[in-house]
Image (cartoon, rainbow, N blue to C red):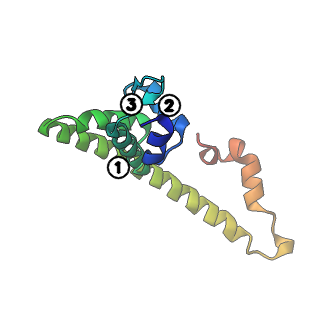
């Protein structure tokens, strides 16, 4: 099938297909007599695998590792498990960071409940002074 057909079958655009090819996620397809790329059904399966891995939070490097493992035997399962455990640890870190940000913002919003004459905007002040007074808010 031609590039556009393969891309449509995989649910991506043509640029994504070519990008995966440049990255080595897809082998360079043979060309037919008229010079068009000729993708087989395995290319569509590979692209769908990569897109599903991305939906699960894996980046393209992870997806490449997982693709290699998918072709392996029983020992590949242990390696895939290690990749998944690393992803879980990363997600746990991100959840903790987001929870801390949420608690901080909740505290700032609570300051807005004061009567107008008795308050300044702690949210705007904190954002304006974050790099000086609150380094934890600017990612340091």
Q: Which is more toward the observer, 64 or 18?
A: 18
Q: Which is more toward the observer, 84 or 42?
A: 42
Residue 103: % across, % down: 56, 62
Check disc 1 and report the residue beneath it.
88
Badge 3: how crowded within 10 Å, few (<14), some, or many (20+)? some
Label 3, label 2: how many angstroms apart (C-alpha)?
Answer: 9 Å
Check disc 2 and report the residue beneath it.
19
Q: Image quadrant of residue 77?
A: top left
Q: Secondary structure at mark 2?
A: helix
Q: Is the Cβ of the residue at disc 1 closer than 8 Å to that at disc 2? A: no
Badge 1: how crowded within 10 Å, few (<14), some, or many (20+)? few
**3 or 2: tag closer to the N-terminus:** 2
Q: Residue at x 71, y 42 (%)?
A: 132
Label 1, label 2: how many angstroms apart (C-alpha)?
Answer: 27 Å
Q: Which is more toward the observer, 31 or 104?
A: 31
Give the position of the N terminus as an image quadrant.
top left
How many numbered callouts? 3
**1 or 2: tag closer to the N-terminus:** 2
User: Furthest residue to the right?
Assistant: 117
Check disc 3 and report the residue beneath it.
26
Q: Residue at x 53, y 42 (%)?
A: 13
Q: Residue at x 59, y 46 (%)?
A: 136
Decide if residue 108 is on the left or right side of residue 136: right
Decide if residue 47 is on the left or right side of residue 74: right
Location of residue 2 with respect to 113 vertically, above or below: above
Q: Image quadrant of residue 109?
A: bottom right
Residue 57: % across, % down: 42, 48
Of tags 1 and 2, which is closer to the observer?
2
């Amino acid at each position: 099938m031609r590039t556009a057909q393969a891309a449509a079958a995989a649910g991506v655009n043509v640029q994504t297909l070519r990008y995966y090819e440049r990255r080595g996620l897809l082998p360079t397809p043979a060309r037919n007599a008229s010079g068009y790329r000729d993708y087989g059904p395995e290319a569509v399966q590979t692209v769908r695998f990569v897109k599903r891995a991305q939906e699960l939070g894996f980046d393209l490097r992870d997806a490449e590792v997982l693709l290699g493992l998918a072709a392996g035997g029983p020992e590949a399962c242990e390696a895939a498990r290690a990749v998944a455990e690393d992803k879980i640890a990363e997600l746990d870190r991100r959840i903790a960071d987001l929870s801390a940000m949420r608690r901080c913002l909740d505290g700032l919003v609570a300051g807005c409940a004061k009567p107008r004459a008795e308050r300044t905007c702690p949210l705007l002040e904190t954002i304006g002074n974050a790099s000086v007074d609150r380094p934890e808010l600017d990612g340091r």
